Amino acid sequence: MGYVSEDFLHDAVNKATCDLFTFAYRHVVKPHAVFNVPPDKAHERMIDFCRATGRVAPLMALLHGMLDYTDPVLETSVMGVGFANPFGLSAGLDKNCDMPVLLDNAGFGFETVGSTTSRPCLGNPRPWFHRLPEYDSMLVHVGLANDGSAKVIDRAERAWTKARSLQMSVSIARTNDDLVGDLDEGIEDYRISLERAANRTAMVEVNISCPNTHVGEPFTEPKNLDRLLDSLDTVKRSQPTLIKMPLNRTWPEFRDLLSVIADHDVQGVTIANLQKDRTGLVVPKEWKGNLSGGPTYAAGNDLIRRSYREFGDRLAIAGVGGVFTPAQAYAKIRAGSSLVMFVSALMYRGPQQITVLKRGLAALLRRDGFEHVSQAVGLDA
Ligand SMILES: Cc1cc2nc3c(=O)[nH]c(=O)nc-3n(C[C@H](O)[C@H](O)[C@H](O)COP(=O)(O)O)c2cc1C
């Protein structure tokens, strides 16, 4: 009888459970429990499910046992923060911090909660979402609905201290309500949330690029961004800060923003937010919002490559947009991303997608002779 090592067996079980989850999500859960109701309702259900199951420790242990996949080739350190793997949930799905226990047990390297704002915020009138499955995309028009940064950051801090290995990032944005005033009011709004977050999470992301608010994006103008960051620089904090960048900018405009950012107490940029350009896509005009998923992929990669080339020695890049496969994650890394985030893949493919991405990326890195994921960062830039 041949000897079968414990590692080999664990790996085989992990692969089989991952395939089983993929099948079950595609053929049972998605058609019968997610896509059979309007997307706003499906989102509520998913949050309720995460909140409820996260409290059942044996269930979480089971999930961890079945799905988690660790591999030294995926471990990395970015901006002084250690990660079990470079994959994180991007901002927007877990606005109020209801998902960390589930994501931790499923094996995410980190998650970004929020975006959250200094005042609790109701967001835009519903519907917030429309599905565009033919483009692997969601049309998003939430407008920063959330419970407010005081509560959300308390929850994030508590979740972070209890997590197995999940690093927590909090995305802060400007409140989208009737009390919004001038630029100084906007700066003060961000500042309040940053003061609340200081030293209480692994990272902070400053979202200057939400395309769904009624004040627009004034801090994507270089002069205004400079003023905002002057103020945020005075908030003493130990964790690194990233800026969530807009997608729809020409390279000279984007580079001007990066030049401003590089002069401040900021360690990284997240590239990028939702796609506003609907050119070539069949999307009903009356549907409000901006696109996630497929339509963000190519434009995001281009900005990542150019940013890495000119600012790679100054700013870390977290790449996000249209990552559904290990090959797409690898392309983001080779373009210059040290971290890779996703939202749409979780909605369209299911919770085991984190394992699919980790397993596949590890295989691609080994195929190309790398010992650590960091060695591949920026090779195609
Ligand atoms: C449902 C949903 C809500 C989002 N809300 C936010 C948000 O509050 N703040 C933010 O910075 N980005 C938000 N985004 C943008 C995502 O973080 C991400 O940049 C974008 O969806 C591209 O990634 P994906 O293709 O993996 O979905 C949201 C995206 C989706 C799908």
Image (spheres, rainbow, N blue to C red):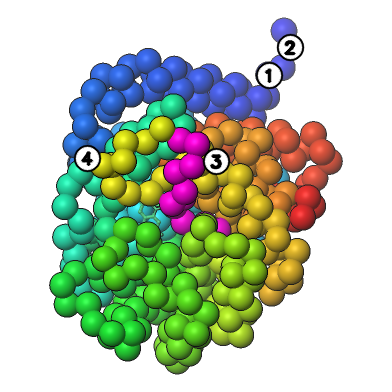
Q: Position of residue 94 (x, y in %)?
A: 32, 51
| Separation of marks 3 and 4 at Cα, in angstroms | 22 Å
Residue holding disc 2: 2
| Separation of marks 4 and 2 at Cα, in angstroms | 53 Å
Residue 40: give its label.
Answer: 4
Q: Position of residue 345 (x, y in %)?
A: 46, 37
| Separation of marks 1 and 3 at Cα, in angstroms | 35 Å
- Relative placement, left or right, of 74 versus 375 is left
Q: Secondary structure at mark 1?
A: loop
Which label sits in the foreground, 1 or 3?
3
Mark with earlier residue (1, 3): 1
10 Å crowding of disc 4: few (<14), some (14-19), many (20+): some
Q: Is mark 3 within 8 Å of ligand 1?
A: yes
Q: Secondary structure at mark 3?
A: loop
- Relative placement, left or right, of 215 versus 204 is left
Residue holding disc 1: 4
| Separation of marks 1 and 2 at Cα, in angstroms | 6 Å
The residue under label 1 is which amino acid type? Val
